[in-house]
Image (cartoon, helix red, strand yellow):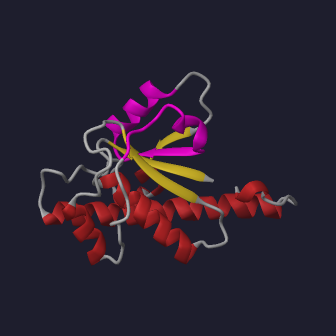
C-alpha cells in the first residue's frame, strides 16, 4: 500500500504526517508492507526541509523530520499511490480537481481515520504558535494510528478469507 499525504506547501502538515506515519507503521504495524511520501499542491517550498517549528514540534514527540524535503504534487502521483490523504477540505478539493480522468487512487481526509478527533481538518499552523504545531502532531498521530488500524483490519480480513495478501496490500 502506497500512501501520499498532501497539504498546500509540504513544509508543515503533510511532512509531519509522512514522518509520523512511517515511524508508527515501523513500530506498531511492521507486518504491513507500506510506503509513504508527502507533497504539496503548490510549489512554494520545493526542495525545502520542513518548517523549523514543524521539526521542533515533531521532535518533542520523538519524530525526526529533518531528512524530508518538500515537493509538489504531480499528476503521475495519482497512478503511483493507492491512497492520497489530504490534510483539509481545501486540499481534498484541490486533489479532486487535479486528478486525471480514470485515476484509481482513493482520495480522502487523514482525519476520517480519527473519528475521535472531533474534526476533519488538520489546521494549517504556519501563521500560528508552537501550540498550533503541537496540535498538528497530535492530530496526525490520531489519524495515522486510525489508518494503521484500518489497514491491519483490511489485511487480516483478506488473509482470514483464505487468501494471502498480494504485494503487501
Q: Residue furthest front?
A: 47
Query: Can you give x and y, in whole percent of width and height, for residue 145 in the image?
Result: 48, 66
Quadrant of residue 86 within the rendered picture:
top left
Determine the residue positioned at 71% across, 59% down. 168
Q: Is residue 69 left or right of residue 22?
A: left
Residue 80 sits inside the magenta stretch: yes
Q: Which image quadrant: the C terminus?
A: bottom right
Query: Can you give x and y, in whole percent of width and height, for residue 85 in the image?
Result: 46, 46
Q: Nearer the viewer, residue 89 or 166?
A: 166
Determine the residue positioned at 20% across, 63% down. 52
Q: Nearer the viewer, residue 102 or 72?
A: 72
Query: Can you give x and y, in whole percent of width and height, for residue 161 in the image?
Result: 84, 59
Q: Is residue 42 left or right of residue 161?
A: left
Residue 88 sits inside the magenta stretch: yes
Compared to 75, does 32 lie above or below?
Answer: below
- The residues colored magenta run 71-99
Quadrant of residue 151 within the rendered picture:
bottom right
Query: Can you give x and y, in whole percent of width and height, for residue 108 in the image?
Result: 48, 42
Q: Is residue 121 left or right of residue 112?
A: left
Q: Residue furthest top?
A: 101
Compared to 97, does 104 lie above or below?
Answer: below
Determine the residue positioned at 33% across, 55% down. 118
Amino acid at each position: 500500500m502506497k500512501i501520499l499525504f498532501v497539504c498546500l506547501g509540504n513544509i508543515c502538515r503533510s511532512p509531519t504526517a509522512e514522518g509520523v506515519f512511517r515511524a508508527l507503521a515501523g513500530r506498531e504495524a511492521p507486518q504491513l508492507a507500506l510506503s509513504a511520501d508527502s507533497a504539496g499542491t503548490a510549489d512554494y517550498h520545493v526542495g525545502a526541509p520542513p518548517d523549523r517549528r514543524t521539526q521542533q514540534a515533531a521532535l518533542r514527540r520523538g519524530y525526526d523530520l529533518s531528512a524530508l524535503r518538500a515537493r509538489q504534487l504531480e499528476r503521475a502521483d495519482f497512478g503511483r499511490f493507492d491512497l492520497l490523504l489530504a490534510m483539509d477540505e481545501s486540499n481534498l478539493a484541490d486533489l479532486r480537481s487535479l486528478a486525471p480522468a480514470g485515476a484509481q487512487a482513493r482520495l480522502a481526509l487523514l482525519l476520517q481515520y480519527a473519528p475521535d478527533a472531533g474534526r476533519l481538518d488538520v489546521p494549517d499552523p504556519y501563521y500560528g504558535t508552537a501550540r498550533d504545531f503541537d496540535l498538528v502532531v497530535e492530530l496526525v498521530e490520531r489519524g495515522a494510528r486510525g489508518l494503521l488500524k484500518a489497514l491491519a483490519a483490511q489485511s487480516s480480513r483478506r488473509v482470514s478469507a483464505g487468501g494471502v495478501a498480494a504485494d503487501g496490500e
